Amino acid sequence: MEIVRNYPLIEQILPSWKDQIGENYNGYRGHIYRMFNCCLALKNCSEEEVTKLAIAAAFHDIGLWSDHTVDYLSPSIAQAQKWLAENDLSSWAEEIGLMIAMHHKVTPYRDPKYPLVELFRKADLVDFSLGFFKFGLSSQYISRLKSEIPDAGFHKFLFDGAKDWFFKHPLMPPPFMKW
């Protein structure tokens, strides 16, 4: 399977956040593309599904920077919904909102109405776990993905944020975790 390194819709959305994301921009961009590719590798998607996945991928963690908070799911959803409204795609707001809201759900998302939510959750977990969780993707594919789309410090950024959270709240799971 060909690895997508540049998708027009992601490239339309993401650059407007470059200044706000700052030094983490390349790392976040890499994470977006690795998880986007995992989505495409896990399911043969329609053009509409690919478009929804691209939008959700671009916005899924953006609240980290838009609102400067570790409780970033709601701000990320709000930014995605604002963009959807501005682009006459509000009919997708519920599904894309769920994709973002549930992408750190520990257990599978089981509502058959929105199968992309579970696909998106799995793809994020593949990249977040550095390929420990594969969901049927081959180790070779994941290695190739990591090689062709570098981490650029994204996992260090995540680790540093998690370290700060657990130091301040040692007995409390981060607010973005869903059961």
Image (tube, rainbow, N blue to C red):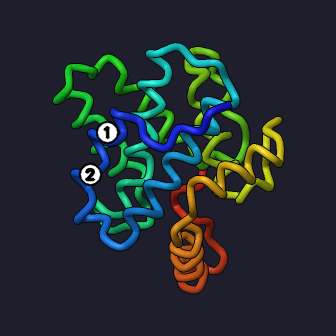
Q: Which mark is residue 106?
A: none
Mark 2 neighbour density, 10 Å: few (under 14) some (14–19) many (20 or more)? few
The residue at which mark 2 appears reads as 15
The residue at which mark 1 appears reads as 80
Q: Is residue 124 above or below residue 114?
A: below
Q: Nearer the viewer, residue 109 or 2?
A: 2
Residue 75: % across, % down: 33, 51
Q: Nearer the viewer, residue 125 or 162?
A: 125
Q: Is residue 163 left or right of residue 41?
A: left
Q: Is any atom of residue 118 visible in this view?
A: no
Q: Nearer the viewer, residue 55 or 137?
A: 137
Label 2 SS: helix
Residue 39: % across, % down: 61, 33
Q: Three-letter amino acid code at disc 1? A: Ala
Q: Is residue 38 left or right of residue 69?
A: right
Q: Is residue 73 above or below residue 70?
A: above
Residue at horizontal 43%, vertical 61%? 71
Label 1 SS: helix
